[in-house]
Image: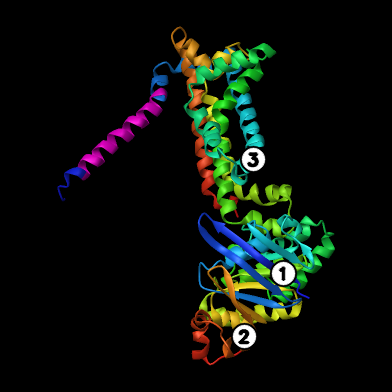
Amino acid sequence: MPSDKTQIAIYSLSFFFIAYMLVSLFYLYVAVEESFNQVVAALFDTEVLGALTISVASAFLVGGLAVAIGVPVAYFMAFKEFRGKETVEMLLIDMPQTFPPVTEGLVYLLMLGRFGLAYTFAAVVIAKFYVSAPFTLSFLTRRFRELKGDGYDVIARSLGARTKHVLNWVMIPLSARDLLGGFSLTWARAMGELAATLAFAGAIPWRTEIIPTLVFLTSRNAPAIAMAASVIAETLSLVALFSFRLIARERKWLT
Amino acid sequence: MAYLKVEGLAKRYGDTKIIDSLTLSVNPQETMVVMGPSGCGKTTLLLMILGAIKADQGEITINNRVVNNLPIEEREIGYVPQDFGLFPHLTVSENIGFGLRVRTYPEAEKNRIIHALLETVDLKDMGERKPRQLSGGQKQRVALARALAVNPSLLLLDEPLSSVDEATKEHVRRGLKDTLTQTKVTTVCVVHDPEDAFMLGDRIAVMHNGRIIQCDTPKQLLDAPNDSVVRKLIASMYVLGRDS
């Protein structure tokens, strides 16, 4: 075997990094094993069920809204040329992913709190939407630009198509995978969002308390509940991401 | 009276003139081939007639109507792009019927037109296939049928033979010529290959640096090329010993 030291160093570092990331991901399941019975009991705790219901319902709502709003906005961003477009795109797509979520929660508290929206289910959705919707918008904008580059909109219009036909018969069907990808990442991000939701919606059981806030609030005093909630959250996000990968690989979806 | 008139058309990107005071007239039912080397502005001209690129200057008239400010969907122009642009998620029949669906044709009428066109372009049994299952020549014929389905007032073809393999090119070219003769639709066809130009065109407009430098019948072009650029472009036709 040749003694290529650089290659050995690269392989070793990569191996340790991958192992570290996998352990970080799956250690929770190992930890659960030690207090298995308590965690299983906590899975049926009413507060855990409440947080799960609010989390899943709000994440689906956020995913649906992201698609419903993302399609027209992505069309606008892909097709309309205007001054400062790059900056607007950065503020719409990149900024929400780097902006401190807790600060965003505070902004919403100050901006929308006066309308009675703070500490409501709507507040959960609004807070999660800001942080998670950019995934869908980003996927769709990129795909619509590709399709525009291929000239599909011009061809459709030469056949008499109006914007509604271009969107419904060409752009959306040809973006099915991206739509699904954007939705699943938005959903997963919405499931994991904590800080913005906590700041703007609080943690009222069966109303605004979600899995991440429950984990945050119980990790010190009721670790079994925190672990049960974490297992649910992690399993759901793993399932969501693997489903997306599987469907995305199934090329029949596209053509 | 010309059916399509392009007068004083100009387009520049930054400091580069792509189309430079271009003038062109196409008669009713005529196939006008615009020929020129890559990058001479042929496709830009086509896209300006189509309405996908706005002209900086000049006027485009189709059937006595100035169309400069009309959106693409109101120009009633059939367009076949270089890569044919078939919608990959639709079958051949659905591709051909796209424009009819937009115009909400009744199902029976739509199917009748699709069947007739499938016969015209010799693809009778391929209606249910997806574009990825077709050869280059077959895709070209589907794209042509799709453009013709809505009975356009003008047909624009962008390098219709460039994605067709050499083995079947002659056959596809003849098929295209026959379809154009049969349907009698006024056509502007952009090509770079002189052999395609001489086979397809009733007249040939030679384009160079964003201008038309000669526009004549294939025979006139061979007999009296008025410019060394024209002579060079059609040199292969003398070698082949072809005329119109």
Badge 3 amino acid: Val
Position of B15 relative to A139 (above/below): below
Q: Nearer the viewer, residue A5 or A253?
A: A5
Total numbered labels: 3
Q: What residue does disc 3 label?
A: A71
Question: Residue B32: x, y in percent?
Answer: 66, 76
x 67%, y 82%: residue: B202
- How packed is label 2: few (under 14 Cα within 10 Å), some, or many (20 or more)? many
Image coordinates for residue B213, horizontal then vertical, percent: 58, 76
Q: Which residue is mark 2?
A: B218
Q: Position of residue A136 (x, y in %)?
A: 57, 37
- Pointer 3: residues within 10 angstroms few (<14), some, or many (20+)? many
Depth check: give the residue in front, A51 or B54.
B54
- Single out the residue that lies furthest toward the left: A3
- Report the disc number at residue A3: none
Tag 1: Cα neighbours inside 10 Å, few (<14), some, or many (≥20)?
many
Asked if marks 3 and 2 fall on the same chain, the answer is no
* Marks 1/2: CA–CA distance: 20 Å
- Looking at the image, is mark 1 or mark 2 earlier in the sequence? 1
Which residues make up the magenta segment?
A: A7-28
Displayed quadrant of residue A44: top right
Give residue B5's mark.
Answer: 1
Chain to which mark 1 belongs: B
- Labels 1 and 2 share a subunit: yes
Q: Amino acid at mark 2?
A: Pro
Q: Main secondary structure of the magenta part?
A: helix
State the SS at label 3.
helix
Q: Whole-percent x and y of residue B98?
A: 73, 59
Residue B93, compared with residue B201, is above or below; it is above
